Image (spheres, rainbow, N blue to C red):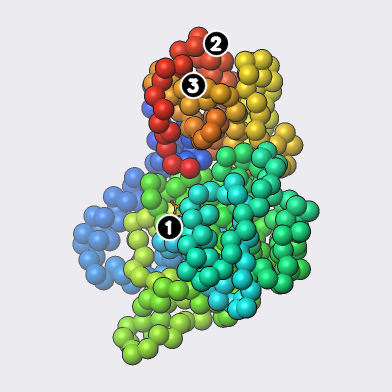
């Protein structure tokens, strides 16, 4: 399968070592593209070191230029609707706050009780600060949110619905278009978290009628730890929305240093302060690389990778007490497989300690295996499943530590 892989060449564009464990955590922190090393070296030595403050001439446009690259190549967003700024948490907060302001008189925020913690926390904070209610809906554990199960929770009181497109634990992928329709029928705005979608599956923000979205770039976009996030606002909404952190990067005629805040037209109004230039340059390298490989080819390989792992699960791991906690239909999942096992935490730790497989553990009992298509080989999937089987059979995991590793 690796010999016939049309994007098998892509792995060489990343830094690898022969003695490296099988890396199945690219959905937590993606691997380092070799070109990023050169890019940062040039940026630091030449642009900053020599160019000094003059280089801001080229840096000022980076949030929009790289935002458009990410938007057009990976998110199905026409130019002028995506910028790079801040962290995902901050962007979600800004967009949620702007959405609530745009729906005065409505008092309920709706999300998923299994949504990523930061999403739930920031919505909880917003609800508390505004005296609103936060409704966390319990969707099926494996299949995640569906329009049918969401609809009964939405009505004329709903201001905002915030969901993850691909669930960080189960990997379930929501039907964006159908859910947007249900949200819009209630008159609310929708906010999508794309952390486990961007760079892994083709997202169609414009075509599905999405309102708002944000997501990170250090997972499938391979832009490095803490790299800045993206945010998307549908063009027709931009003028009517105001995010809460009024800063000079969102101001008309920024360097006139004028007296009062007057937000610019377009996406720059969703920026606040100085952009993280080094981080955005890394996003640019990561996104260019994925664009070169092609998001549809990435998706095609990802489906074959996750399907291979499901086959190995059925053959080797189900008999050992593992449960598949990811949808079996490949069209309904992202690029990861989640396996439940009472000793998942110890098994994950034992694999990392023996230096064979890096995966991650998510409470309460999940082993999460991220299969980033540009960097994962089919043989990696086969070998990793075999090691999981052997470690589980050996019982070597039983007294391992109890700490989760990595960032979601
Ligand atoms: C990784 C992740 C985040 C991370 O947010 P940060 O602000 O970058 O820490 C948010 N949401 C989801 C669903 C994630 O998987």
Asked where in the image residue 190 lies, by quadrant, the reply is bottom right
**What is the spatial separation of the Cα atoms under label 1 and label 3, in whole angstroms?**
31 Å
How far from the left and from the top, in percent, is residue 45? 24, 55
Decide which of tag 2 and tag 3 comes sooner along the chain: 3
Q: Assess mark 1: CB under 8 A from ligand 1?
A: yes
Neighbor class of circle 2 (other Cα within 10 Å; few <14, some 14-19, many 20+) is few
Neighbor class of circle 3 (other Cα within 10 Å; few <14, some 14-19, many 20+) is many
Decide which of tag 1 and tag 2 comes sooner along the chain: 1
How far from the left and from the top, in percent, is residue 287? 50, 52
Judge from the rendering whether residue 174 lies leftward or rightward of residue 167; answer left or right.
Answer: right
**What is the spatial separation of the Cα atoms under label 2 and label 3, in whole angstroms?**
10 Å
Asked where in the image residue 90 lies, by quadrant, the reply is bottom left
Residue annotated with mark 3:
347
Residue annotated with mark 1:
87
Query: Relative to the observer, which residue lies in front, 138 or 287?
Result: 138
Residue at 41% across, 20% down: 400
Decide which of tag 1 and tag 3 comes sooner along the chain: 1
Neighbor class of circle 1 (other Cα within 10 Å; few <14, some 14-19, many 20+) is some
Position of the N terminus by quadrant: top right
Query: Relative to the observer, which residue lies in front, 77 or 177?
Result: 177
**Front tag of 1 and 2:** 2
Residue annotated with mark 2:
393
Q: Is residue 331 above or below residue 204?
A: above
Asked where in the image residue 29 lies, by quadrant, the reply is top left
Looking at the image, the residue that sits furthest to the right is 148
How far from the left and from the top, in percent, is residue 6? 62, 35
Task: Say what secondary structure mark 3 lies in.
Answer: helix
Task: Say what secondary structure mark 2 lies in.
Answer: helix
Judge from the rendering whether residue 265 lies leftward or rightward of residue 316; answer left or right.
Answer: left
């Amino acid at each position: 399968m690796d010999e016939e892989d049309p994007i098998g060449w892509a792995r060489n564009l990343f830094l690898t070592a022969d003695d490296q464990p099988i890396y199945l955590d690219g959905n937590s922190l993606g691997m380092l593209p070799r070109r990023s090393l050169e890019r940062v070296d040039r940026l630091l030595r030449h642009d900053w070191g020599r160019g000094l403050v003059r280089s801001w001439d080229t840096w000022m446009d980076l949030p929009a230029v790289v935002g458009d690259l990410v938007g057009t190549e990976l998110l199905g967003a026409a130019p002028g609707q995506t910028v790079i700024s801040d962290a995902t948490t901050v962007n979600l907060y800004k967009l949620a706050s702007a959405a609530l302001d745009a729906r005065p008189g409505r008092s309920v925020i709706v999300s998923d009780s299994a949504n990523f913690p930061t999403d739930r926390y920031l919505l909880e904070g917003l609800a508390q600060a505004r005296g609103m209610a936060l409704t966390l809906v319990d969707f099926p554990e494996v299949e995640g949110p569906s329009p049918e199960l969401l609809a009964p929770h939405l009505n004329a009181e709903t201001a905002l619905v915030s969901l993850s497109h691909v669930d960080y634990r189960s990997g379930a992928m929501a039907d964006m278009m159908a859910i947007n329709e249900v949200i819009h029928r209630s008159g609310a705005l929708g906010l999508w978290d794309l952390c486990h979608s961007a760079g892994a599956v083709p997202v169609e923000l414009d075509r599905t009628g999405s309102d708002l979205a944000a997501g990170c770039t250090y997972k499938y976009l391979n832009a490095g730890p803490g790299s800045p996030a993206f945010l998307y606002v549908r063009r027709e909404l931009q003028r009517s929305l105001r995010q809460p952190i009024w800063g000079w990067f969102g101001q008309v005629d920024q360097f006139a240093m004028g007296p009062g805040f007057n937000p610019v037209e377009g996406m720059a109004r969703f920026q606040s302060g100085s952009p993280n230039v080094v981080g955005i340059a890394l996003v640019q390298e990561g996104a260019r690389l994925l664009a070169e490989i092609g998001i549809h080819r990435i998706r095609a390989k990802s489906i074959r990778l996750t399907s291979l792992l499901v086959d190995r699960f059925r053959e080797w791991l189900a008999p050992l007490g593992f449960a598949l906690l990811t949808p079996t239909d490949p069209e309904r999942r992202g690029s990861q497989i989640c396996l439940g096992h009472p000793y998942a935490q110890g098994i994950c730790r034992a694999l990392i300690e023996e230096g064979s497989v890096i995966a991650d553990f998510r409470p309460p009992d999940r082993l999460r295996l991220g299969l980033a298509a540009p960097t994962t080989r089919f043989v990696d999937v086969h070998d990793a499943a075999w090691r999981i089987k052997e470690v589980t059979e050996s019982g070597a995991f039983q007294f391992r530590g109890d700490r989760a590793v990595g960032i979601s």
